[in-house]
Amino acid sequence: MAHVALKNVTKRFGSVTVIPPLDLEIEEGEFIVLVGPSGCGKTTTLRMLAGLETATSGEISIAGQEVTHARPGERDCAMVFQNYALYPHMTVRDNIGYAMRVHGTDKATIDTRVNDAATLLGLVPLLDRKPKNLSGGQRQRVAIGRALVRQPQVFLFDEPLSNLDAKLRVEMRTEIKLLQRRLGTTTVYVTHDQVEAMTMADRVVVMNAGRIEQAADPITLYEHPANRFVANFIGSPAMNFLTARIENGAARFGDQSLALTEEDARRLGDRGEVIFGIRPEHMREAEQAAALTFMPDAVEPLGPHTLVIGRVGDTKLTAQVDPRFGVTPGTMCTVQVDMTQAHFFDPESEARL
Amino acid sequence: MAQTAGRGDSIKHAFIGPAFLVVLVVTLFPLIYALVISFQAIRLVPPLPPRFVGFGNYAEILSSARFWGSMWTTSVIVFISVAFQYVIGFALALALHHNVAGASLYRVTFLLPMFLAPVCVALIARMVFHPYLGPVNDAMGMLGAGNIPFLTEPNLAIAVLITIEIWQWTPFVALLMLAGLQSLPGEVFEAAKVDNIPAWRRFRDITFPMLLPLSVAVVFIRLIEGFKVIDTVFVLTGGGPGTATETLTLFAYNEGFKKFNLGMTSALSFTFLIVVIVFGTLYLAAAQRVTRRYA
Ligand SMILES: Nc1ncnc2c1ncn2[C@@H]1O[C@H](COP(=O)(O)OP(=O)(O)OP(=O)(O)O)[C@@H](O)[C@H]1O
Ligand SMILES: [Mg+2]
């Protein structure tokens, strides 16, 4: 029995369908990350779980209870908002303890829990400050603390780190992940940052236009993307896509031909057009390598490696190469492609082949 | 560098000069002129030469029962009506903010009383509360209560004045409070909903404290404005019976335009100014103590 389940849930705002039927089951203690481009319905899905939006149709259940039409407060979720949504006139201590106080928890318990949360999140010296006297990261920790002390069935996070600077984001992401491990509370986390999604999630749900494109653990998502959208979305820099023809166990485009691995050749057989996908970081020397020649336009040294941006025919292509790899923009260059890491997609359905 | 700064300085004065003069002439001069007059005995009818009397006018005011009576009347009208305006106005704003059924109808009409000139409102009220012709007494008659002398019995007359003030100015409070409500961050309330905070606690612990600074300002505006009430009183009761419903401004008006006692009127105006300043300061000091708890 799933701990949180969305069955056939749809959401319409007026005549606009934001979520076509969506099914998702979340296990107890699982850390789920909803990721996808802006406007794909992540927040809407999360808000439906919280009860802040009502599903147009379908069924939502949390901890075995049908809650489709329950008020937000009846669902035992705790939510952390993108803009923290702290009570501006209350001190950190009051912010964290407020819900418990309203619900009549006795004072000793409140104090213990607030202090525990504050210790855990490093908020002890800040307990008597007002939110406006805190930094963004500290406010975020208060918001997390407020969710924490409720000991809810489910944590809901809506892009909680997007207002923080890059360094703090990396720290907080680890903190949240560790915290969730320790508490074992089922968590749904929304982000549009794929690195956050990959690093934090037990299972990543990639959404696009309200549909789930793929729900899988990060490595599966990276190694076996279910379709072109996922392949493109996950990984940075993004995967290269070339339109190719499969002939005689090789992928051909223009006058180039890249030999497939035996297994790929067997699976794909001879067929007309496919989309050939290869990640920039898989353009490297390998046992089953094939040479690919392209026209470099720009070189971007990053330190550990260098990105070469160029064209094959009219298609843009990015290759990640060794910093000492000799390449001059404007002069043809050849890289090795690790064919064991090649992906193939149907040009019509864009599904993985 | 220093030279440029020096030249910039003198230019600065040149620019400010005209505005400063305008302010001086337009606002300060009349005030000072009035202040000077308030220390003199001047009568227009019959004309008497101005005579310096020092604080004589003020002493006369402070020892006059009529002044203290008008002071009491004004305070009663202002404090009771502003309290009702605030409570009802806030409640209306909440209803409109949460789109309670019928809110859209009210949204269109609720500002109308505010747009009416107080004199018109008073004239309407005079008809409505007329002892023989008014619908209120018709209704009272049907209920078996006799004709009630709304405008001639002092306490009833004050009650009617309070009612008019409330009717006319509650929309103003509602409008400002609604603006305040709509500017509050929605996420904070969503967070409270998710945390299962009941509606009335959300109001008491979140909405109200967050709107406290605005409330202080709105009540302040209404208090100051309320103290100036004259037109409705003038039309409705003329301050009568006797001087039972005379407000501070009406008192000053009567001194100035019925007795043409200008020195006295000036002194009254300044007394009025001092009264408003004292009340205003006391109020703001009290409000600040409350607000500081939340700020
Ligand atoms: N109240 C609303 N009325 C109408 N349309 C809405 C409403 N709320 C959201 N939408 C639409 O629903 C779609 C999904 O919005 P949602 O906020 O869920 O996106 P998101 O995935 O969270 O995007 P982002 O990453 O930018 O936060 C958007 O196209 C948005 O315009
Ligand atoms: Mg969003």
Image (cartoon, coloured by chain):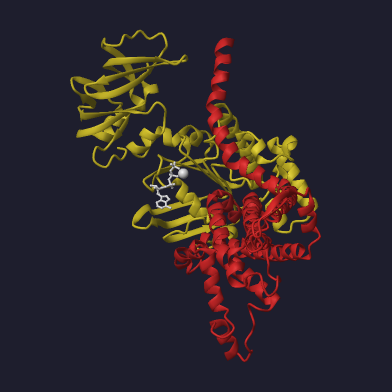
Chain colours: A yellow, B red
Q: Can residue B273 be seen in this view?
A: no
Question: Which image quadrant for residue B28?
Answer: top right
Towards the viewer: A255 or A265: A255
The quarter of the image holding the C terminus of chain A is top left
Percent across and percent down for residue A24 are 45, 51
Tally the marks.
0
Residue sitting at x 45%, y 46%: A42
For residue A211, above or below residue B250: above
| Percent x, y of residue B138 | 55, 87
Of the pair B78 and A240, the residue shown nearer to us: B78
In the rendered structure, the answer to whether residue B219 lies left or right of residue A161 reads: right
Q: Where is residue A104 in the image (x, y as percent from the top left)?
A: 73, 59
Looking at the image, residue B112 lies above or below residue B268: below
Residue A194 can be seen in this image: yes
The residue lying toward the viewer, choosing from B107 and A308, is B107
Front residue (pair A193, A142): A142
Q: Horizontal placement of B109 versus A83: left or right?
A: left
- For image coordinates 23% across by 30% down, the residue present is A243
Residue at left 37%, top 28%?
A238
Residue A298: % across, % down? 33, 15
